[in-house]
Image: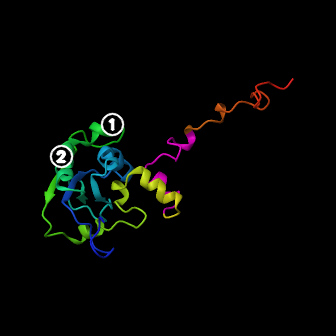
Amino acid sequence: GAFASSGMESPVGPRLLIGGIPDALHVPHLRAFFDPSVERGLFRCFHFRRPKQQVRAAGCSCYVVAESEAAAEEIRRGYDRTPWREVLIDVQVPFDACCTVEMLTASGLDLQAVEQLRPPPGLPRGNVGTPRAQILREIAACRLPPGAIPRLGLASASGEPRSARSFAAVPPPGTATPPGGRKPA
């Protein structure tokens, strides 16, 4: 499995530090930014918790675990120095704000790292790293509340936001052709 022997230990695998995360970005933004890698399963654990106190002027950071060394390198190549606005065009972040990805060694992880590498049971790969289909399965199995959908920035199970579904697509009563092919007289 993705985790070491006890469920309370951190996931095993190559560790990365995602940095330069602007204050304006939240879980739905990070899911959108990293979507191709999340949906391909490149993250073993990516659980974003904004630190209570920001210590860096360049934004906050998040420790993540990649699925493999190759996945870690692909994540680094694909996202290091990528401007947040290149993907998140509607979010108010500074034009020069970039995502940074740093490869880490296993030693020297602080308390924040350990916290971020322990996602809740319903989000086994974290609130950013768990693929959409797996989240919807967890909701269907009642391991996650349906309220998680908007908090994670996901559309409904039909694939579109509830407000986008229209009753106008349903014909008014009496105009639909019944099974037999003839309309009522």
Residue 140, magenta (yes or no): no
For the residue labelled by badge 1, is the local secondary structure a helix, a strand or a loop? loop
Q: Residue at x 12, y 64 (%)?
A: 105
Q: Quadrant of the N terminus?
A: bottom left
For the residue labelled by badge 2, is the local secondary structure a helix, a strand or a loop? loop
Q: Quadrant of residue 60?
A: bottom left
Camera-side residue: 33 or 91? 33
Where is residue 134 shown, x and y percent of the image?
42, 55
Residue farthest front in this picture: 180
Q: Residue at x 28, y 64 (%)?
A: 53
Where is residue 35 shown, x and y percent of the image?
33, 45
Q: Residue at x 53, y 63 (%)?
A: 142
Where is residue 179 shown, x and y percent of the image?
75, 31
Residue 145, magenta (yes or no): yes
On screen, residue 47 above or below 114: above
**Pair 2/1: label in front:** 2
Mark 2, other Cα within 10 Å: few <14 / some 14–19 / many ≥20: some
Residue holding disc 2:
80
Residue holding disc 1:
89
Q: Residue at x 75, y 27 (%)?
A: 177
Q: Amino acid at mark 2?
A: Asp
Residue range (magenta): 144-163
Mark 1, other Cα within 10 Å: few <14 / some 14–19 / many ≥20: few
